[in-house]
Amino acid sequence: MDSPPARTTVAAPAATPAGRRRITARSAAARGLWWLCSAGFVLFFAVPIVWLVLAPTKSDAQIISGHPFALGSMADLARTWHKLYGYQDGAVLTWIGNSTVYSFGALALTLVTSVPAGYALALTQFAGRKLLLTITLIVMIMPASVLVLPIYLEVDAVHLTGTIWSVVMPLSFFPFGVYLTYIYFSSTIPADVLAAARLDGCGEWQVFTRVALPLARPVIALVGFFSFVGSWNNFFLPFVMLPSSSQYPAQVGLSNLLASSQIVYPAAASGMGRPELALAALVTILPVLLVFLFSQRSLVSGMLAGASKE
């Protein structure tokens, strides 16, 4: 019996020095372009933040005529703070306190409603489930300003306009939180785990509270953070609902401060200039920054939850 013919292998042609140089030049150019684009994006976003941090340490004249990134003095910073704090007898702190109450109140109601709703849509079967999920997705992509007028008419019909509930209750309606919990429960928690709990005698409420809810801590933190940030930065709804400056949250208060500043009206009696406005913006950003710093580990785990499924 004849032996099969031996296989011959053809070696790939070795790259010439000129070819290697062309490949090296292309990769170096690609890396250079990537670094250039990254540096451009960093400068685009970092420069305004650096200017905002340095502005309260300078006087208004130094901001206009001096170097934009020059550091001022602590004396100017103290003067800016005292001037800002003196506006309407400490209205800035009142606005921040109002934002805290509105945001945490809406956060509590959001978690109470969004997490059970997402669980029910993902892991239970009931009549109208798909229709309810479709409506949730449609409302989620609608601009929030579109809903302000019908919400105002509803709140006014029950005589809650101008109260804390006129802001907290609409802000607690958070369809994006429902969608996040729906995605988490449907892609992360195995149905067999819940079925085993039911076989052990747990009712649906016990399955949710004792099995599903402890496993959903990452997505709860994620929904809570997005709800807090969205409520804190909301402007249009409190602006429509609240008539008094003492009830304003921080974002509406900043708009009121800007409208009465010397930048908009040079003859304004308040005397609020650029340093005071920059410091007010920093003070209102600080709570959101602190919440992010203390919850970033939970946020990362919540964002990665459901990314892979065994």
Image (tube, grey):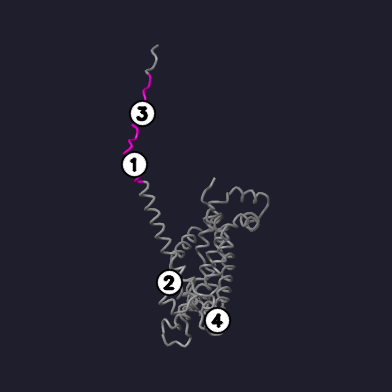
Mark 3 vs mark 1, foreground winner is 1
Q: How far apart are marks 1 and 4 (CA)?
A: 63 Å
| Residue 11 is one of the magenta-drawn residues | yes
* Residue 289 in view, yes or no: yes
Task: Using the image, tell me which numbered label, if any, was put on residue 68.
Answer: 2
Determine whether label 3 and label 2 are within 8 Å by CB: no
Badge 3 or badge 2: first in the primary sequence: 3
Secondary structure beneath dot 3 equals loop
Of the 4 image quadrants, the one containing the N terminus is: top left
Q: Which amino acid does label 3 sit on?
A: Ala
Determine whether label 3 and label 1 are within 8 Å by CB: no
Q: Distance between the residues labelled 1 and 2?
A: 44 Å
The residue indicated by pointer 4 is 82
The residue indicated by pointer 1 is 21
The magenta span reads: 6-26
Outermost residue on the left side: it is 18
Q: Distance between the residues labelled 3 and 2?
A: 63 Å
Q: Distance between the residues labelled 4 and 3?
A: 79 Å
Badge 3 or badge 1: first in the primary sequence: 3
Q: Which amino acid does label 2 sit on?
A: Pro
Q: Few, some or many C-alpha atoms within 10 Å of disc 3 (few <14, some 14-19, many ≥20)?
A: few
The residue indicated by pointer 3 is 11
Determine whether label 4 and label 3 are within 8 Å by CB: no
- Describe residue 143's horizontal placement relative to residue 208 as left or right: left
Q: Position of residue 247 (x, y in %)?
A: 54, 80
Q: How far apart are marks 2 and 4 (CA)?
A: 23 Å
Work out whether 260 lies above or below 73.
below
**Of the pair 57 and 310, the residue shown nearer to us:** 57
Residue depicted at x 42% and y 88%: 267
Outermost residue on the top side: it is 1
